[in-house]
Amino acid sequence: MKFTPDQFEKETDRLYDELQKAGWSREDCLLITPLTLEINALKKKQDAIILAHSYQTPDIMYGVADFIGDSYGLARKAMEMDCKKIIFCSVHFMGETAKLLNPAKEVLVPSVAGCSLAASITPEDVRKLRERHPDAGVVCYVNTTAAVKAESDASCTSANVVQIIDAMPQDEIIFIPDKLMGINMKKLTKKKIHLWEGTCIVHERFDEEAVKAIREQYPNAKILAHTECNSAIVDSVDMAGSTSQMVKYIAESSDKEFMLVTECGLTDRIKVEQPTKKIVGTCNLCPYMKEISLKNVLKALKNPSDDQKIEISEDIAEKAKKSLDRMFELEKSSSL
């Protein structure tokens, strides 16, 4: 596709206006201008929307994405959009969730990126857990494959996990696959919980000594942690919750300094969207999320490979969708 010098100039200015807040130079923005121009032109031509998880890099979030958020929120957002195609800049299971909620739309992922949580458990593992605990209901964290969701009674997110578990009819619950989130959640429910051994490779690497050091160095900083972290960290921070809850907390807070105990993409997002807030301390990168690039977003639009296309067999899709629908039902019933 051909673009005029004026179009290049305006696009570079647009990119720099946003990305400089995340430390990008105008020269950096100039390098990606040809890609963002072509991607944005193609998505309009193809009646497509681009969704970007908060762990993506700034060039994707602010260069080409139509919406930024967590996997569940974005998949729900796509349901509201009148479009033919969804490009989901995320790990693979998130693309599956979008397809389950938007079966009539074409869903593609730029890269077939994995996830340590999703990879930690198989459908056969879930069936064996049911045999071991026949009276227990199965609640799966949304960070699972469609095939695992199909073996579960209800799905949940990091924001509604306690609400869903408490609303389940069983007194015993098998919670899969995040062990650390499960340990944190067990303190907030009276139900008997059986856990799996899955962990997030990003959040399991944080340790309480780093949090303590930030407290000493920045006594006025509010420290926020994802509930996929270990309980020693979750119990010691000012706020623990989901990605979306952390974004909301910072946006509404009058405090100016924060440490985010989560993936680095969220730090970049806060720097761009809340430029008056200061982020201190360190973050961890997700190697899976960082597989996504503007180049493979462009490929998904121009010449997608078969593995970029999200396809779910009809039997698995039907059962997995029931798990998500059950979550919506339990949310609604517990809010009445």
Image: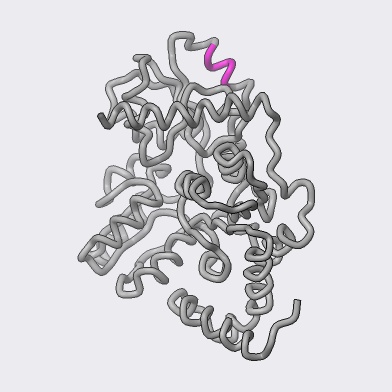
Residue extending farthest to the bottom is: 5
Q: Is residue 238 visible?
A: yes
**Residue at 42%, 64% in the rendered image:** 267
Counting from the top left corner in percent of width and height, residue 119 is at 62, 37
- Residue 233 lies, with reference to residue 124, above or below; the image says below
Quadrant (top left, top right, bottom left, bottom right) of the C terminus: top left
**Residue at 65%, 81% in the rendered image:** 31
Q: Camera-side residue: 301 or 172?
A: 301
- Residue 308 lies, with reference to residue 99, above or below; the image says below
Quadrant (top left, top right, bottom left, bottom right) of the N terminus: bottom right
Counting from the top left corner in percent of width and height, residue 281 is at 37, 64
Dominant secondary structure of the magenta stretch? Answer: helix
Q: Camera-side residue: 324 or 111?
A: 324
Counting from the top left corner in percent of width and height, residue 79 is at 51, 45
Q: How many marks?
A: 0
Indicate the quadrant where residue 100 lies: top right
Q: Camera-side residue: 312 or 278?
A: 312
Direction from residue 100 to residue 67 in the image, left or right:
left
Q: How is the image coloured?
A: one colour
Indicate the quadrant where residue 28 lies: bottom right
Counting from the top left corner in percent of width and height, residue 287 is at 60, 55
**Residue at 62%, 24% in the rendered image:** 123
**Residue at 37%, 32% in the rendered image:** 183
What residue range appears in magenta? 126-130
Residue 195 is covered by the magenta coloring: no
Direction from residue 206 to residue 249 in the image, left or right:
left
- Residue 58 lies, with reference to residue 82, above or below; the image says below
Q: Is residue 116 visible?
A: no
Residue 129 is covered by the magenta coloring: yes
